[in-house]
Image (cartoon, rainbow, N blue to C red):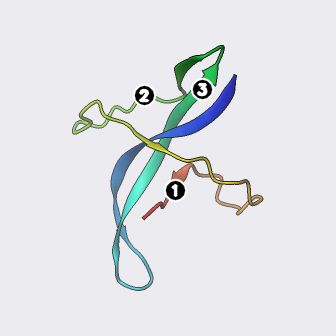
Amino acid sequence: MKRIKKLMIANGEYTNKDGQTKTRWLECGSVMEGNGKMKIKLDAVPTKQDFDGWFECFDIEPYQGNKGSGSKNIDFD
């Protein structure tokens, strides 16, 4: 099976160095494709109180090496 999208949820906000408010994203799983079917693989189940059950799908970015944080919180804004 091939991973074709990342499943993400908005997980709060932060202010960047330019003073802009940005969304903090948490990767929770993947959309996979194989044998003519699409499947979803959850790696984490959100437990925050205001989680409404909706995930967003993002394109997979090319790997750019270890940036040292070890975190899956990613800014796509």
Depth order, front residue of 54/12:
54
Q: Are marks 2 and 1 in contact (CB under 8 Å)?
A: no
Q: Which residue is mark 3?
A: 32
- Of the 4 image quadrants, the one containing the C terminus is bottom left
Q: CA distance from mark 3 to mark 1?
A: 20 Å
Q: Tag 1 or tag 3, which sits nearer the N-term?
A: 3
Give me the residue at 53% from left, 32% from top. Answer: 29
Residue at coordinates 70% horizontally, 54% vertically from top-left?
Answer: 62
55 vs 58, left or right, is left
Q: Quadrant of the N terminus?
A: top right
Q: Are marks 2 and 3 in contact (CB under 8 Å)?
A: no
Measured from the top left, where is residue 46 in percent x and y? 38, 33
Image x and y of residue 7, in percent: 48, 37
Look at mark 2 in the image and give the residue it sits on: 45
- Between discs 2 and 1, the one toward the N terminus: 2
Determine whether the residue tagged by mark 1 lies in a helix, strand or loop.
strand
Q: Amino acid at mark 2?
A: Val
Indicate the position of residue 34 as horizontal and vertical percent values: 65, 19
Q: Residues within 10 Å of mark 3 (few under 14, many from 20)?
A: some
Q: State the residue position of label 1.
A: 74
Secondary element at tag 2:
loop
Residue furthest front as drawn:
36
